Amino acid sequence: MVKSKKKVLLITFVSFIFLLTVYGLYITQYNNSSTSMLVNKHRLVIVENNEIVDYKTIDSHAFKSAIVDEEKFDQLKQYMQENNLEIKPGEYEIEDADSFKKLLKKINFKKSGDK
């Protein structure tokens, strides 16, 4: 009788561990699939009249967190450096799904040092 109870407890324990593992795998797969799809978030970035946002200062500006794609952000920074540009004061709506070309069309630039 004691061996039978031990056997039942062992089978119950193994079944419980198996169910937890399957559940954990299901949750992991669900989380990975939901985060792998890009959610197109819109972010509003404001450049105040007294701010200078050029390639040197853009790392510490809200543009850094608004452009989640690091490659796209680096392209923007390089573009600004190569063309000696600053971002004009104003409000800019940045979307995750924006291509680099579309991003450039949304942002108003001026030559560094111009008023």
Image (tube, rainbow, N blue to C red):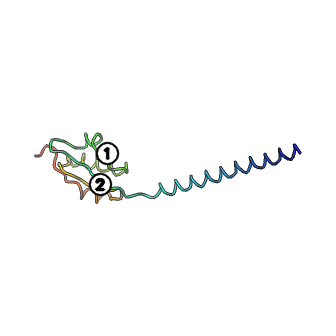
Residue at the far right: name it.
Answer: 1
Residue kind at label 1, given as amino acid type:
Lys
Q: Residue at x 65, y 50 (%)?
A: 21
- How packed mark 1 is, by other alpha carbons closer than 10 Å (few <14, some 14-19, many 20 or more), is some
Q: Dot 2: what SS?
A: strand
* Residue 54 in view, yes or no: yes
- How packed mark 2 is, by other alpha carbons closer than 10 Å (few <14, some 14-19, many 20 or more), is many
- The picture places residue 107, in percent across and down from the top left corner, at 23, 54
Marker disc for residue 94: 2
* Residue 84 in view, yes or no: no
- The picture places residue 38, in percent across and down from the top left corner, at 42, 57
Which image quadrant: the N terminus?
Answer: top right
> How many numbered discs, if any?
2
Q: Dot 1: what SS?
A: helix
Task: Choose between 20 and 75: the one closer to the eye.
Answer: 20
- Left or right of residue 20, residue 85 in this image: left
Relative vertical location of residue 25 with respect to residue 60 in this rendering, above or below: below
Marker disc for residue 95: none
Task: Choose between 4 and 81: the one closer to the eye.
Answer: 4
* Mark positioned earlier in the residue sequence (2 or 1): 1
User: Residue at label 1?
Assistant: 64
- Left or right of residue 30, residue 78 in this image: left
- The picture places residue 58, in percent across and down from the top left corner, at 27, 43
Q: Residue at x 49, y 57 (%)?
A: 34
| Cα–Cα gap, marks 2 and 1 | 11 Å
- The picture places residue 39, in percent across and down from the top left corner, at 40, 57
Residue kind at label 2, given as amino acid type:
Ile
- Left or right of residue 65, residue 110 in this image: left
Q: Residue at x 27, y 52 (%)?
A: 44
